[in-house]
Image (cartoon, grey):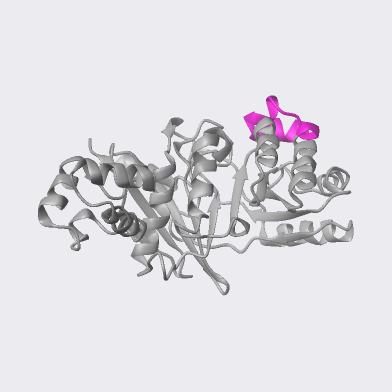
Amino acid sequence: MKNSLLDLSFDEIENLVTSYGEQKFHAKQIFNFVMNGKEIEEMTSLSKPFREKLLAEYVSNPVSIIKDIKSADGTIKFLFKLLDDNVIEGVLMKYKYGNTLCVSSQVGCRMGCKFCASGLNGLVRNLTKAEILGEVIAVNKFLGGSNENRKITNIVLMGSGEPLDNYDEVVEFIKTVSSKQSLNISQRNISLSTCGLVDKIKKLADDGLSITLTISLHAPNDLIRNQIMPISKKYSIKELIESAKYYFEKTGRRVVFEYAMIDGVNNNLDCAKQLKQLIKGFSAHINLIPLNSVKERGLVGASKHQVYWFRDKLEEFGLSATVRRTMGDDIDGACGQLRNKYLKNS
C-alpha cells in the first residue's frame, strides 16, 4: 500500500524533494497541490520523471469519494474509501452562513450508544490526521473549491467514531486544518462532539484549543443514560457536567449539549426539570435532536409535537434550547447507515 503525501509535513515534503535530487522550491508547490486536492498526475508544473518517482511511492490524498447522495434539501452524504479499502462517511450541510462538513474520526466506533448506527460493527481502527483532513480536502475539491477559494466554512467532528477516543490524531487534525498554511478554518468554526470521555474533555480544555465542545448528553440522570449510553457506566452525569463546566471555565467557550428525543425514554416533564438542575449556573445550550430511528436499535423518536413541547418547557425553566433542523433524512440520515448498507452489499 502506498503512502500519502498528506501524511507529510512541509519539512518532510522538502526532505523528500531533495532526496529525489530536486530543488527545494518544489516542496511548496507540492504542499499547495496537496491542499488543493490535486492528484500527483495533475501536478504538471513538476517534470514527468519527478511525478513518476512520486507515483511509485505515494498518492496525494488517502481519501477518495466513491459515492455521493444528494438530499432534497441540498444535504450531500459522502461515502469515502481509504487506502486500506475501509470506508467511512461524511455529510455536507448547506446553511445561509456557509457549508458545514461533518467528518468521521474512526472507522466504526466502540462506544455502543443505543441510538447510533455507526457502532453496529464495532471499532475497526482510528483514522489518521491525514485521513480526517483528507475528507475535508476531497469535499472541498468536489465543490469546486481550492485552498485560496475554500468552499467549506465549518467542520463538525460528529461522523462515525468518538473523536476523543482518537485524541492525538484529532487534535493534530484540528491544529493542521486551522493553520494558515493549510485550509485556515478558524477553530471557532470547528465543533467536536463527544459521548462524554471526562478525562479527555479536561485534557482538551487544558490544551488551549478554541473549538466548540458538543456533549452527547441524551439523558438527565444516570438511570436513563446507563440504558442508552454504555460510557455512563464509567463516568457519571455529575462527573460529566463538572468536566463541561471545567471546559467553559478554561476556554470561555459555551458548551452545547446534544439531546436526542426518544419516545417514552427521556422526553417527560421530570426529565425537563432534572435538566434544569443539571445545567443551570454556567453558559450552556441544549440542542434537541429529533431522533433518526435505527431499525437495528429498536428506539423510536419522539413526535414533532413532543420535541417542541419539551423545548418550550426548557425555555420556561430559563435554559437556552433549540430544536436541530432535520437534514438529509431521505438519504440514510443517521450516522453509519450508508456505510452499513455499502458493507452489506459488498
- Residue at image position (62%, 50%) is 301
Relative image position of residue 281 (x, y in whole percent): 89, 48
> In the image, 36: left or right of 26?
right
Residue 330 vertical position relative to residue 80 in the rendered view, above or below: below
Q: In the image, residue 100 lies at what x, y percent?
A: 52, 62
Instruction: Residue at the far left: name it.
Output: 49
Please report the bounds of the magenta region as a residue range. Answer: 221-239
Q: Say which residue appears at 77% left-offset and 52% top-offset.
A: 252
The residue nearer to you, when weighing 122 against 169, is 169
Tell me where residue 277 sits by quadrant.
Answer: top right
Q: Residue at x 49, y 35 (%)?
A: 109
Q: Which residue is at a point 67% across and 53% down the rendered structure image?
A: 302
Residue extending farthest to the top is: 234
Task: Tell me, yes or no, whether the highlighted magenta stretch contains residue 234.
Answer: yes
Residue 317, picture quadrant: bottom right
Q: Is residue 271 left or right of residue 84?
A: right
Q: Is there any visible trace of residue 59 in the rendered image? A: yes
In the displayed structure image, the side of residue 66 where residue 294 appears, left or right: right
Task: Identify the main secondary structure in magenta.
Answer: helix
Q: Is residue 346 visible?
A: no
* Percent x, y of residue 325: 61, 64
User: Where the N terminus falls, by quadrant?
Assistant: top left
In the shown orientation, is residue 196 left or right of residue 79?
Answer: right
Residue 195 drawn in magenta: no
